[in-house]
Amino acid sequence: MEQWITDIMSDYGYFGIFLLIMLENVFPPIPSEVILTVGGFMTTTTTMTIPGVILASTAGSLSGAVVLYGIGLLLDVERLEKIVDKYGRLLRVKRADIHRADAWFDRFGIWTVFFGRLIPLVRSLISIPAGMSNMKFWLFLTFTTLGTLLWNTVLVYVGEAVGDNREAILEQLDVYSNIVYALIVLVGLLAVWYYMKKIRTRPMD
């Protein structure tokens, strides 16, 4: 995959970086760690510059994030309420559950978006609940930009600094990603356990 990424950057320059990062946001399995570190390294072998790579990658990230935010808007609270009204008894979900989740995101959402941009997998998907909660677009864009700019800047500079030795850095980033994925799975399992426990103790209507 790294050779494919390198070829696209070599052929299309900044636009290639923009396109790759935009796709990475919409399709999380494409690793931004590789794209950004390769982009940073290529500033030492091509005419591309570090500010240019950071700008192109950040623009790509924002474009992908806006797409997912739009998807979230299509699945807003009102639509979810209609789903709950129709299937709520089967799913054991009430309108109040949706409102509690929405209120939580309204309270902590901006920081969730910011820090979420620093976490593999979550950094892409966090845009969907932001749209679902109807977070103000300018707030979403501001905190997405800040988190994305931090992530991109660090990895581009890392790629430029380590050069051909970036494999060692990528191995460390891979360990970080695997730890995060394991934590996500653990949290998911705990959520399922809590939900099932709640179902067993909830009185039947």
Image (cartoon, rainbow, N blue to C red):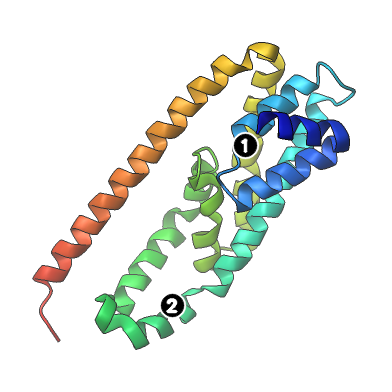
Quarter of the view holding residue 14 = top right
Residue wearing tag 1: 32
Amino acid type at image mark 2? Leu
Looking at the picture, tell me which residue is in the foreground, 123 or 147.
123
Amino acid type at image mark 1? Ser
Residue at (48, 80) in percent of width and height: 79
| Numbered label tally | 2
Q: Position of residue 117 (x, y in %)?
A: 55, 43
> On the rendered image, what quadrant is the N terminus found in?
top right
Query: Gap between marks 1 and 2, in whole Å?
Result: 32 Å
Q: Secondary structure at mark 2?
A: helix
Looking at the picture, tell me which residue is in the foreground, 100 or 174.
174
User: Of circles 1 and 2, which is in front?
Assistant: 1
Residue at (63, 66) in percent of width and height: 70
Q: Is residue 31 left or right of residue 184?
A: right
Q: Secondary structure at mark 1?
A: helix
Residue at (86, 38) in percent of width and height: 12
Compared with residue 45, is residue 117 higher up or lower down, i.e. above or below? below
Compared with residue 98, is residue 21 higher up or lower down, i.e. above or below? above
Q: Is residue 173 left or right of residue 38?
A: left
Quarter of the view holding residue 136 = bottom right
Q: Position of residue 81 (x, y in %)?
A: 41, 81
